[in-house]
């Protein structure tokens, strides 16, 4: 019998502790993660990537959340402290920071499973029935309550969130095979030759890095894995392939609850994918709806004035077309076309910004031409700069992605990084 009533799901979420793995280095983002963790990278005009899994937790009714941090986590921790302090501790609600503390071992986190293991005493102190393990570096909206309900209904020991991906992209993920009851029969982490789904030769079933464990199962498996000298202590490489041979491990296909089609989910782990996911938000009807009041994305934001457009002369008119601009932006006699500007970006007169993503606190001088760029926080673009028009010149000064997106950071411009990346 299916027990999908709201009361049943609410009971599941109250008995769940979520752990967000947010310690990743994110090396494929190059200089964007030189001084910040990948989950702290800005996204969508006013958010950071970490806001999406955290918002999913709160909107799903899961109000006990631990964020496991390690790599260059200062800006990430400060963002969470500022933006996620609205939960009420007296009601048992919290978003708790769990930096590497060498609580169990005299070493830093050595893998995703080891990161959870080293916080086992804290996890046990909350006495959860279920532990939801999430990646802190993906962009999507998902009701975890439905996944928890499926986990209980299927009497699973472990449930893995999964999504269909093109076969040519599947080697970047954990790929699984399932039977008719969605029990996982095979799992391979980042295979060189991924297996297609039955009846869908161009697609593979990929892990989203979302796991629901019965807490007792999690504690036992982490302890077993810890004792194996041959293990890399990673969920995808070690824990999951091990448990599917012995336990009931089920898949939870992530689909849109309205259309039942494959839902929106983005791994924004490269310069190209990060730029593309931001640019998709400008579309007339984007797949990721940030205007959805039923599933808001929460974040910390400064109190800023509205965006402002000034001057209306023939050759000096402040305009923005097919674009999104956050609070505090000033477009002063310049043109912004098909671009996304984060907060407090100032574009000076006679400049053009096109097909670009501009992070907060950027100043673009007069007579600049910028195209197909991703500009990091705090950059001061000198007057007369041209970016995106001469590949050879761009490669000499900046990082150019495989698809031709130009990453510009303060260091590349000979400038200091701003405080609070």
Image (cartoon, rainbow, N blue to C red):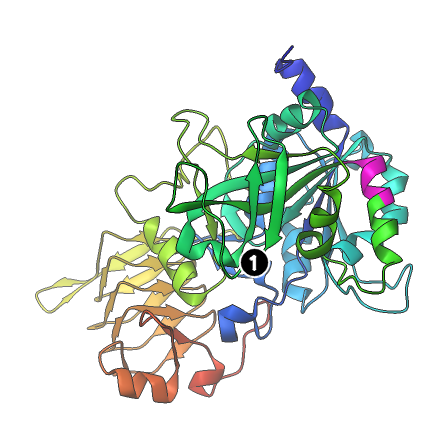
Q: Which of these two is toward me, 298 or 144?
A: 144
How many numbered circles are shown? 1
Whole-percent x, y for residue 136 in the image = 61, 52
State the image quarter where residue 243 is shown: top right
Q: Residue at label 1?
A: 190
Q: Is residue 155 left or right of residue 140?
A: right
**Residue at (65%, 13%) from the top-left corner?**
3
Quadrant where the C terminus lies? bottom right
Q: In the displayed structure, would residue 147 be above or below residue 348?
A: above
Choose top left, top right, bottom left or bottom right for residue 128. Answer: top right
Question: Circle 1 — which element?
Answer: loop
Judge from the rendering whether residue 313 lies leftward or rightward of residue 184; answer left or right: left
- Quadrant of the image containing the N terminus: top right
Q: Position of residue 290 (x, y in %)?
A: 42, 40
Give the residue displayed 26% in from the left and 77% down from the top.
366
User: Does residue 191 appear to the left or right of 393 in the view shown?
Assistant: right
* Magenta segment: 214-220
Mark 1 nearby-residue class (10 Å; few <14, some 14–19, many ≥20)? some
Q: Position of residue 285 (x, y in %)?
A: 29, 39
Q: Quadrant of residue 156?
A: top right
| Above/below status of 372 relative to 206 | below
Relative to the observer, which residue lies in front, 340 or 361?
Answer: 340
The vertical placement of 92 against 108, above or below, is above
Percent coordinates x, y for residue 327 in the rendering: 41, 53
Q: Is residue 327 visible?
A: no
The secondary structure that most of the magenta stretch takes on is helix
Residue farthest toward the top in the current orientation of the protein: 1
- Is residue 256 something one can see in this rendering? yes
């Amino acid at each position: 019998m299916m027990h999908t009533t709201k009361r049943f799901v609410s009971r599941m979420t109250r008995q769940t502790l979520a752990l967000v793995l947010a310690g990743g280095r994110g090396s494929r983002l190059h200089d964007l993660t030189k001084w910040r963790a990948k989950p702290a990278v800005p996204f969508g005009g006013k958010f950071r990537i970490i806001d999406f899994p955290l918002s999913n937790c709160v909107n799903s009714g899961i109000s006990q959340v631990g964020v496991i941090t390690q790599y260059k986590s200062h800006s990430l921790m400060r963002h969470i402290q500022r933006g996620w302090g609205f939960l009420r501790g007296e009601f048992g609600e919290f978003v708790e920071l769990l930096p590497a503390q060498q609580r169990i071992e005299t070493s830093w986190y050595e893998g995703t499973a080891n990161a959870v293991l080293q916080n086992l005493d804290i996890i046990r102190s909350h006495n959860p029935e279920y532990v939801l393990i999430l990646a802190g570096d993906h962009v999507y909206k998902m009701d975890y309550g439905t996944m928890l309900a499926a986990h209980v209904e299927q009497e699973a020991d472990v449930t893995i969130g999964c999504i269909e991906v093109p076969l040519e992209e599947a080697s970047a993920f954990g790929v699984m095979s399932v039977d008719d009851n969605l029990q996982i029969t095979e799992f391979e982490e980042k295979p060189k030759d991924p297996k297609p789904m039955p009846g869908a030769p161009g697609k593979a079933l990929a892990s989203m890095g979302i796991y629901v464990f019965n807490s007792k199962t999690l504690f036992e498996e982490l302890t077993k894995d810890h004792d194996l000298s041959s293990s890399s202590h990673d969920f995808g490489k070690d824990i999951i392939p091990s448990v599917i041979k012995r336990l009931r491990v089920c898949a939870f296909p992530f689909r849109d609850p309205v259309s039942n089609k494959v839902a929106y989910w983005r791994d924004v782990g490269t310069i190209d994918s990060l730029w593309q996911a931001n640019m998709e938000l400008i579309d007339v009807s984007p797949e990721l709806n940030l205007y959805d009041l039923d599933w808001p994305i929460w974040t910390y934001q400064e109190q800023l004035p509205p965006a402002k457009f000034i001057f209306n002369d023939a050759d000096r008119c402040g305009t923005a077309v097919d674009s999104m601009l956050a609070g505090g932006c000033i477009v002063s006699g310049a043109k912004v076309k098909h671009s996304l500007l984060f907060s407090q970006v100032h574009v000076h007169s006679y400049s053009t910004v096109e097909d670009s993503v501009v992070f907060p606190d950027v100043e673009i001088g007069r007579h600049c031409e910028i195209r197909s760029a991703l500009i990091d926080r705090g950059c001061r673009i000198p007057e007369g700069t041209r970016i995106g028009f001469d590949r050879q010149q761009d490669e000499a000064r900046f990082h150019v992605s495989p698809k031709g997106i130009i990453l510009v950071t303060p260091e590349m411009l000979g400038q200091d990084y701003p405080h609070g990346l």
